[in-house]
Structures are given as structure tokens and as C-alpha cells.
Amino acid sequence: MKVTQLTVFLENRSGRLAEVADILGRAGINIRGFSTTEAAEYGIVRLILTDPQRARTLLHDAGFTTHFSEVLCVKVEDVPGGLAGVLDQLAEAGVSIDYLYSISFWNICFAVRDIDRAVELLAGKVTLLSDEEVRAL
Amino acid sequence: MSDVAEEHLTRDAAGGLFWQPAAETLPVPQLGELQMERLRATLENACENVPFYRKKMEELGVKPGDVTCHGDVADLPFTTKIDLRDHYPFGMFARPRDQVVRVHASSGTTGNPTTVGYTRGDLDVWADLIARTLAAGGVAPGDLLQNAFGYGLFTGGLGLHLGAERLGCTVVPISGGNTERQLKIMRDFGATALSCTPSYAMYLADAARDRGLRPEDLPLRVGFHGAEPWTNELRVQIEAGLGEHALDIYGLSEMGGPGVGYECLCKAGMHVNEDHYLAEIIDPETLRPLPYGEVGELVFTTLTRQAQPLIRYRTRDLCTLIAEPCACGRTSARMSKPIGRSDDMLIIRGVNVFPSQIEEVLMSIPAIEPHYQIVVDRKGYLDVIEVWVEVGEDIFAETMGALERFQRNVQAQIFNVLNIQVAVKLKEPKAIQRSEGKAVRVVDRRKAL
């Protein structure tokens, strides 16, 4: 039971990630999960999509460099020790992990350069969660 | 050479210093005659002792005796850096090795360097030419020259050293680097003259200012700066920062190093030592000689070198020659500061680098070609090279670690081959500008120093 993940190379330029999301949105491709990783000058975004094949073609045509890989998607119980249970089994077997990220997709953490301005822009348009609200999820 | 050369430091009525006044102020017609006489001797030396030149002259059907006036020079063959590389290491020598007392080599980074050999007589002339250079800047016995040019295969360090000893000033062979020690010795020893690249002079000026030293705290009076192109704007900054007269000196290892051209305190172009080097300006496309005043490629023929005579050596430096007499009284033609190159050679921190050498390394990495660009820029006073690589699907793996390994790998390969540090920058496809569909391979963003 493997899942296809699409990885996209992005230079650290403002608006590039939005462009990827736009292309997918316009094509009716839904993002099921994603993660971003960045260095000083470039980053990569990993995507779990409803139609990875078509997404790859569209992104390629738009000039993006992409890569397919296979990953596991694991349903982890939402209780203390839930993740540990899975990790322990892989560790005992000596299977090392390159990276992992959550694809529960309703609440997304944004790290931005100007957090106050981002709050100002988004307040009232989307639901912003407080510290307490996140802990109570 | 002794017919016009004497070694008496002389001060003229206006206070200007001359190391060999008779030679340096030789009337132009006599200088021309002397050049022709020495040129014929040089051609004889080359044809008799260097198979490369014997063959070239035979092919062109020119005999040394055929050359009677300056107009005949255009019939002589050119020599290029490639010719020198092809005859590495000693194939261009006109003297057996047991008469060659010194060998220097160019600052090239890869493949065969270009070598230059000196007989004892060549070193003797070289010492005089550098002594002329120093005297033209007002240096005399009693002065102390801090020689911060690198000592070694590079001709700058040992060349200035030799000339300073010939002149009789005190020379401190500090060589390059170690700024703290440079500033300490400059003040403790009371250095009145400095020799180094212009970028290092500016670096020293900044370092002095950062330590709260004012120009008047430094004993310097004059600086001799060369080995890389620089502008009059940088001169003004160096002079303000170090409290010295910053003079330009010109040389290239193929001509024996520094001592080919030098500024006097008029700072109005570099006097070419025309009694030892025949200078021409040519059109680099047609290879035809150009008149004085026009911009073209500087070409030199050695007139007195015994170990390694070179005929019409193409320097690739673009400049003009100025015939009008200089206020200092020297009669030699002057050359303007080089304003560019007729090839694509870059001078990166004093090291000669051809973009083609970087390209060769990049080409050996299949995933890179053809999407890359070499960007030369300047951070502060230091030159930096970035290699921009478009990340195609051959390169792109889906972890950051793999991308970083790729960057480090390319950087290491370039360092191994060229001994220069570059920064590899990863770019999205099509990020590198194409002109007429073809990628622009080299972008030089440096403003002139």
C-alpha cells in the first residue's frame, strides 16, 4: 500500500508556492497533504494530490522541475503515544526515516516573515486559531 | 645595453627622480633607431635558438635582416599564450638551461602554466626596469618599501624585491596577506612605500580605518599597484585611505613580469620601457596595426631578453598608446590603463581564469549541461564567482540533502581543478536568461574597481 508523492523544486521567490497551488486549484486537483522545506535560496514542496499524474504534467508545462516518489501514509491514532507506536516498529526493524509530515489537512501552520501583517490580512476571512484553541483540538 | 644605461639615481631640476636618465629621456628618433637595432638582435636570437620562431619566420619568408623600420614589424609573426602552453615548460627558451638562472610561471589556474626564463643578464635588466619604476615614484635609498606582492612563482613579489635592492632602498619582503601584521610593520618600520595589488591596497586602507588609524598615522608616501585592472576612482580612494600617491604599474609574466610600464607622479598613463619592449596596438579582429591614440590590443616584442625572446606577443589587454611627451621629461610612449580584454579571461582575485575552464568542469557533469551560467560579481573588494545551475529532472531528487550534496560536489570539483572557490546556486528551469535561444554563459557584474 504505497502512495505517490509529487515533489516540486522552488526558488525562494515570493509567490512561487501560490503559483503551484493556483495551477492545481484551476485544474480541480485537490491537495490532500503537503510539506515545505527550505534552504536560504531554494526550497522543495512535497505534495499528496488527488491526481498526481496530471499535476506533474501541468507543473512541468509551467516550467517547474518535479519528481515522483513513493511514500507510506499511516493512520495514526490521535492519542499520546500514537506516533511513537509506529516509529518504534520501524526503528526496531532498522528502517530509517528520511522525513515525515502530517497530512491531516484542516489546520495548517504558517511561518511567515511579517506575522502581524499576515494576521491583519487574514483575520475575518479565514478562521485563525489561538494557542488555547490549538491545544484543545 | 650599457651604451645608454647608467646606474646613477639622478634628480632633475624639477625634482623628478630618474634611475637611468639617459635611457629614460632618450630623444625619440634615437630611441627608434635603438629599437630597430635591438629588434634585429632579438630576431636573430629567436631564429637561431628557438625552433618555433625559426619555423614561423621561414614560413613567412622573413629574415631578421629584412626588418629595417617600424613598418616592417607588421610582417613578423604573432605569439600567443597557446604557443607558450604548447612549448611548456622550456620549449621557448633561447638559451640552454645551464644559462637560465630563474624560472617564473603565470598565475593561470589549470593545465600547463606559461613559464618565463631569465639569464643572469635578464635579471640584471629586470632589476633596472623596476628601479626605474620606483624612482619614478620618488623612491630613493633611505626609503622603506613594504613589498606585499606575493613571493613565489608570481613575478610581482620577487620582481619588486629585485628592483628595490638594485635601487638601494630598504625592502621588507612581507608578501601578501596577514593584514594585522601589515599594518603593524608599516607603522613600526616606517614604510614610506608600499607595493601590492590595488584591491589589497584598498583592503588595507579599510582595515586601517576600522582600527581607527588615520592616513596621517601611516608613514606611506607612495604605492605601486598592479597585476589587476583598476580605475582612477579607486586610485582616489586608496590615496585618501592610505595617504599615499597610488601609482599604476603594468607587466605580465610573459614579458618577464612588472617593469614593462609604470606611472610617474604625473599619473597620466604608464611609461612603457620602450628601449626594452616594442609596443604596438593592433585591431584584434583584423590583426592590423592601429595608430597611436586608438583603442586596440596591446602587443609586445621583447628587445633585450636573452633567455626567452618573444615576438609580437598578444597581451589581449585593450588600451591606447599615447605618443605626446610627458611633463616628467621621459620620452617613452605611455599606455592607458587597460580598459578590457580581447578574450574572455577573468582576473579573479589576481588569478587568471578563463570561463572555458569552468565550463570544462561543468561539462564533465552530465546533469548540468546545458543549463548553467557563470556569474562574476564583487563583494566588497573581493571577486566572487557564482555558478548558476538550472535544476532539471536529472539533478532533482526529492530531499534537501541530495540537493545540498550536489551543490557541494560541483563546488569541490571546480576547486580541485581550478583551485578557486565558487558558489553553486540552484535555479528553476528557464531562470537563466537566454539571448536568441542560447544561454548567456558568462555574466560579469563587477563594476570597475
Image (cartoon, coloured by chain):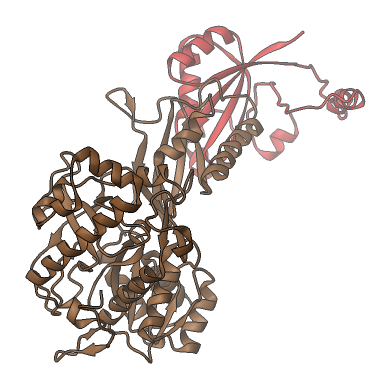
B329 over B152 or under it: above or below: below
Residue B181 image point, x, y percent = 54, 77
The answer to whether residue B295 is visible is no
The N terminus of chain B lies in quadrant: bottom left
Quarter assignment of residue B5: bottom left
The residue drawn where x is 70% and y is 34% is A134
The answer to whether residue B58 is visible is yes
The residue drawn where x is 18% and y is 45% is B62
The C terminus of chain B lies in quadrant: bottom left
B96 over B430 or under it: above or below: below
How many discs mark residues in the rendered view? 0
Foreground residue, B173 or B422? B173
The residue drawn where x is 58% and y is 10% is A52
Foreground residue, B84 or B235? B84
The tint of chain A in the picture is: red
User: The chain drawn brown is chain what?
Assistant: B
Foreground residue, B209 or B322? B322
Residue B413 image point, x, y percent = 57, 39
The residue drawn where x is 15% and y is 68% is B34
Residue B434 image point, x, y percent = 33, 27
